[in-house]
Image: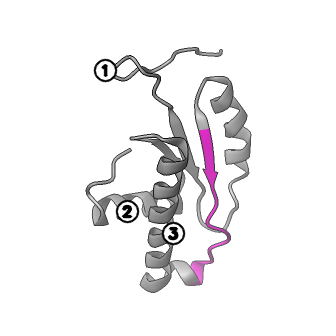
C-alpha cells in the first residue's frame, strides 16, 4: 500500500519528511537498502547511515562507542542541513538504537 500525504508547516510550506536509518553491530544493514525505495515511494527522503563494521571488541570499549556517537552527531547535523529538515525521523536496530539513545542522552537538544 502506498500512502501519499504531504506534511505542511504552519505557514503552508511543504515540510520535507526525512527518515534516517541506522544498522546494528557486525552488519552493514542490507535492510536499509531494501527500506529506502519504499520510503521514497511514500514521499519520505531516506538516509541510510552506515558507520561501518563494528566488532564485539570495539563494542566493549567506551572510547570506540563514544567515537560512533560523535559520528552520529555529525551525520545528524549533515542530514538536517542537507535536507533542510527541522526534525528527521529515525529507524535503528540493535547497536544503532544504542547510539541513538546515547546521542539523545548526551545532546538533549536533538530530537527525532
Q: Residue furthest left?
A: 108
The stretch of residues the image draws in magenta is 46-57
When asked about the image quadrant of residue 57, the answer is bottom right
User: Magenta stretch containing residue 80, yes or no?
Assistant: no
Question: Residue 92 appears at what percent x and percent y?
Answer: 52, 50
Residue at point 59%, 15% (across, down): 3
User: Magenta stretch containing residue 56, yes or no?
Assistant: yes
Q: Is residue 21 above or below residue 45?
A: below
Q: Which residue is mark 1?
A: 10
Residue at point 59%, 60% (across, down): 24
Question: Residue 2 appears at what percent x and percent y?
Answer: 64, 16
Q: CA distance from mark 1 to mark 2?
A: 29 Å
Tell me the tag on residue 37: none
Q: Earlier in the sequence, mark 1 or mark 2?
A: 1
Tell me the tag on residue 71: 3
Residue at point 45%, 41% (across, down): 88
Does 100 sit left or right of 83 as displayed?
left
Q: Which residue is mark 2?
A: 103
The quarter of the picture where the C terminus appears is top left
Q: Earlier in the sequence, mark 3 or mark 2?
A: 3
Protein image colouring: one colour
Of residues 49 and 16, the one nearer the viewer is: 16
Find numbered disc 1 in the image and state the secondary structure of the residue it sits on. loop
Amino acid at each position: 500500500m502506498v500512502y501519499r500525504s504531504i506534511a505542511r508547516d504552519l505557514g503552508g510550506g511543504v515540510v520535507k519528511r526525512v527518515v534516517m536509518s541506522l544498522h546494528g553491530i557486525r552488519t552493514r544493514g542490507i535492510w536499509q537498502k531494501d527500506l529506502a525505495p519504499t520510503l521514497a515511494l511514500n514521499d519520505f527522503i531516506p538516509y541510510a547511515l552506515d558507520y561501518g563494521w563494528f566488532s564485539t571488541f570495539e563494542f566493549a570499549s567506551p572510547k570506540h562507542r563514544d567515537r560512533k556517537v560523535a559520528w552520529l552527531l555529525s551525520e545528524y547535523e549533515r542530514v538536517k542541513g542537507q535536507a533542510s529538515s527541522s526534525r528527521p525521523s529515525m529507524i535503528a536496530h540493535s547497536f544503532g538504537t544504542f547510539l541513538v539513545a546515547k546521542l539523545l542522552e548526551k545532546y538533549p537538544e536533538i530530537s527525532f
